Amino acid sequence: MKRSTLLGWVILAFGATYFILPLLATFEFSLRMLRGQYSFEAYSVVFGDAQFRATFLYSATLALVTIVLGALLVVPTAYLVRLRLPHLRGLVEFVTLLPLVVPAIVIVFGYLRLYNSSSWLPLTGSDAATNALLAFGYVTLALPYMYRTVDTGMRAIDVKTLTEAAESLGAGWPTIMLKVILPNVRSAVLAGAFLTFAIVIGEFTFASLLNRPAFGPYLQLMGANRAYEPSALAIIAFLVTWACMGLIQIFGRKRGAITVP
């Protein structure tokens, strides 16, 4: 075996150990809730908790709303930038990267300052409006990942030729977007959707400061007051995230593209 190959395997083994050992330790600790034996009692307690089900359902619902809003915003934007406005591509990429530069706590304090109950647009004045504000905040957080996955999908197809072919057949803009462009970037949109879902499920700052009953604040509450259940919740959150990553791989390989002869 070459020296460089051996060094690569050593680095890979070190990285895998650094990642896997804490998970194994967390999983092992989550099984020790009953004294003197291993059991899934902590998981049973977690799944039997009505607050767990309510918060997870709330975050999952909000994640689906975020995915729809994000797709409606990003897909037409990426399409127009690639087809009509290529000179604005650098500016759009810079704007979509801002959520990675500006901390979430700064964004949410800006929301509270601008949309508090005494402002001209009191979005924190009711639960429904606050939920909408939270969804918009999640769209902002997921924007870098959603835009790049969709933009990568757009690069893989000939947007100009597809558009001209559809227009020559009499298709309007909505038809082009829904029946030509969207099916061709379906796998990219799904990849962005699963990343968005993983981000929303574990998000804490927005939900906590806006006082919404989401899964992230529930995780923090359990971690502060229980011993074994937080480990079980960490394993569950990890499995949900990796399930999303697996779905990205599966749908990324099943790319059903529409081609123009």
Image (tube, grey):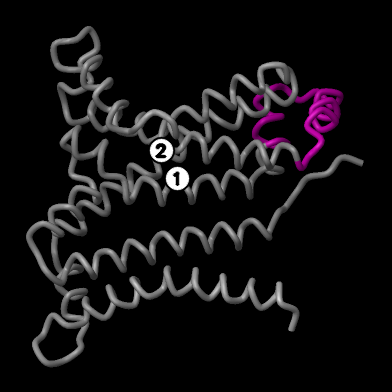
Q: Quadrant of the N terminus?
A: bottom right
Whether pointer 1 and pointer 2 mark residues with C-beta atoms closer than 8 Å, the reply is: yes
Q: Residues within 10 Å of mark 2 (few under 14, many from 20)?
A: many
Image coordinates for residue 83, horizontal then vertical, percent: 75, 23
- Residue located beneath label 2 in the image: 66
Q: Which quarter of the picture shows residue 159? A: top right
* Image side of residue 256 versus residue 99, left or right: right
* Image side of residue 175 versus residue 200, left or right: right
Q: Amino acid at mark 1?
A: Thr
Q: Residues within 10 Å of mark 1 (few under 14, many from 20)?
A: many
Image coordinates for residue 255, horizontal then vertical, percent: 70, 54
Residue sitting farthest toward the top: 120
Image coordinates for residue 246, horizontal then vertical, percent: 53, 64
Q: Residue at x 39, y 62 (%)?
A: 240
Please state which of residues 22 and 79 is positioned toward the viewer in this rendering.
22
Q: Secondary structure at mark 2?
A: helix
User: Magenta part of the protein: which range?
Assistant: 156-181
